[in-house]
Amino acid sequence: MTGTIPLCIPDLGGNEGRYLQECVDTNFVSSVGPFVTRFEAMVAAHAGSAGAVATSAGTTALHVALVALGVAPGDLVIVPSFSFIASANAIAHCGALPWLVDIDPATWTLAPALLAQVLERDCERRGGALVHRASGRRVAAMMPVYTLGLPADMDAIVGIADRHGLPAVADAAAAIGATCKGRPIGALGARLSCLSFNGNKTITAGGGGAVVGDDAELLALVRHLTTTARVGRDYDHDRVGFNYRMTNVTAAVGCAQMERVEALVAAKRRIRAAYDAALAGLPGIGPFPAPPWAKSAAWFSGVVADDAALAERLRGRLAADGIEARRFWKPIHLQPPFAAAPRTAMPVAEGLWQRVVILPCSTNLGDDALARVIASVNAAVGG
Ligand SMILES: *Cc1c(COP(=O)(O)O)cnc(C)c1O
């Protein structure tokens, strides 16, 4: 019953060490190597996509995906305000601005009805482009976010995107293992989907990301852009590229993790189910969203308090009991770098973010630790 329970730590219980040693033994430590190729094949297959390009991070995956789809300086990209700052940063790295919209209370990401409403109300066609009337900027893409590993309602969102000629780039950073109407995250209709293999994600490579998709030509462009847009073997480059490739060393860790992807995702779901079963009946708190048409990857689990004060009290009690519990994302429109970004009213995001309590959810969280967390939450809310 002693020791702090961390929020979310990696589980490196497979072939990670062996594969890392193999990188050293074979002298393949850089961005060319058999683990990179293998990792891409594993990620593409798992995502239900034709191909994958491994990148240095989820953020760089998002950036390069947007560039590949033609997002240019001055453009707007629609993104939910309730996301990790990296979603907006990737847009800003293109010289574009996020158009921040409020979220659907049922999924905590883009609300199809609101999306359709703002596109129709605030935009007009000028030439071939969709233009945001108030700012005069071209709307170039939309970025649904699979919040906490729960896919957005992509059938509806892609329908709206198609109607307006906008490509969708999915921020599926934390969604590996999720399905929507039985389909995996690469098969939900986004032109490109981006994953993260950061240290706190379900599958980690230490750091890293991937862009997955079905359009071979588009993926070839993504790959080209991640490797300094080099043409041929000499120092010829045909545009401004990036140095965004994953290395063989990180891919080695990623491959070892991907070998256990089913078990690691199952562990996340088991933790979610345990919290939901034990805590959902308590006064003042409720579970995370779980619409019937999707199966969340349950990257993070926790509870939503009825008000911010209770959430604060809950986090305080957990901390006192040696349990790491956290707030979740502060909406992007409240972050100083994006204060000037166009945005909708934010009743859902603003009402939500301070009420979320993330509970420990490492894939190797033991039953004793789980029971300790549940007891602490019980004590805090007086159940
Ligand atoms: C983790 C995460 C990212 C960023 O991924 P990095 O690999 O840390 O760059 C982006 N968006 C969301 C929603 C995330 O959860």
Image: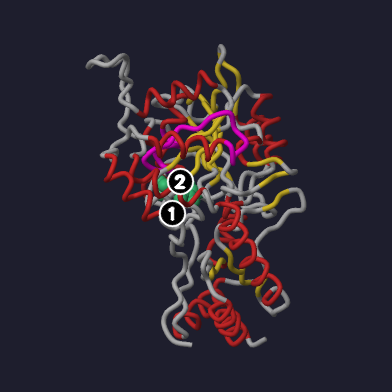
Residue at the image position 56 percent from the left and 58 percent from the top:
264
**Which quarter of the image is occupied by the C terminus?**
bottom right
Amino acid carrying mark 1 in the image:
Asn
Residue at the image position 65 percent from the left and 53 percent from the top:
296
Q: Secondary structure at mark 2?
A: helix
Q: Quadrant of residue 270?
A: bottom right
Pointers 2 and 1 in contact (CB under 8 A)? yes
Disc sitting over residue 182 in the figure: none
Nearer to us in this view, 51 or 356: 51
Return the residue at label 2: 255
- The image position of residue 256, as x and y in percent, is 46, 50
The relative height of residue 212 versus residue 197 in the rendered view (above or below) is above
- The image position of residue 52, as x and y in percent, is 50, 32
First in sequence: mark 2 or mark 1? 1
Amino acid carrying mark 2 in the image:
Cys
Q: Can the viewer see residue 344 in this picture?
A: no
Give the residues drawn in magenta, as a range. 45-63
Return the residue at label 1: 15
Q: Residues within 10 Å of mark 2 (few under 14, many from 20)?
A: many
Q: Residues within 10 Å of mark 1 (few under 14, many from 20)?
A: some
